[in-house]
Amino acid sequence: MFTGIPSGGWIGEGTVLKRELRLYDIVAVRCSTVVHIPMQTFEWLHAHSIEFNHTLIAHLNERLGQYITMMEAGRASDVVARTARSIATLYNPVLYPNMDPHLRLSQTELGELVGLSRQSISAALKQLEVEGLLRVEYGGITVSSVERLRNYEGPEDGEWR
């Protein structure tokens, strides 16, 4: 299971809290600036800052919700619904508060995140574009309705195209 971390997002708090080695690979698909907070700093904030702990709890809760949503989307038999819901997970306002409507991901990269082929992603994006949920553009897609993507079950008219 994969997810994307957009600009301003952060990861790794669970590993630090559990004091274990990172069990997952993190791969940057384009040039990225990464800031590392030393474990001692993280632990000091955790021990002394109520605001940090509130943020941490909210972040962990949202991450759990994102994981459950991704599991549900991954089990969707319909590739369009799976694609729609997977894209919506990237627009969590708590985890990724500064998301731009334009998602800079190639269809191949999106396919890797969703667990589908580029061809399946292409067909799913065309369907979602026809329904007005997003626009396929050079260098990515522009999302028109995160809420409709999040709740997507099939074409609005009830018939598969």
Image (cartoon, rainbow, N blue to C red):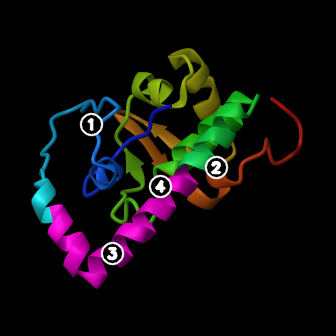
Query: Would residue 112 be visible to someone looking at this image?
Result: yes
Residue behind mark 2: 132
Where residue 31 appears, x then y in whole percent?
15, 35
Residue behind mark 1: 21
What is the three-letter code of the residue carrying label 1? Leu
Q: Residue at x 44, y 70 (%)?
A: 58
Residue behind mark 3: 53
In front of the other: label 3 or label 1? 1
Where residue 150 appears, x then y in whole percent?
64, 53
Residue behind mark 4: 63
Circles 4 and 2, Cβ within 8 Å, touching? The answer is no
Reading the chain from its start, which is encountered first: label 4 or label 3? 3
What is the three-letter code of the residue carrying label 2? Gly
**In this picture, which residue range is highlighted in magenta?**
42-66
Calculate the distance from the C-alpha at mark 2 to the C-alpha at mark 3: 39 Å
Instruction: Mark 1: give few (<14), some (14-19) or many (20+) Cα within 10 Å.
Output: few
Q: SS for tag 3?
A: helix
Query: Would residue 94 be visible to someone looking at this image?
Result: no
What is the three-letter code of the residue carrying label 3? Asn
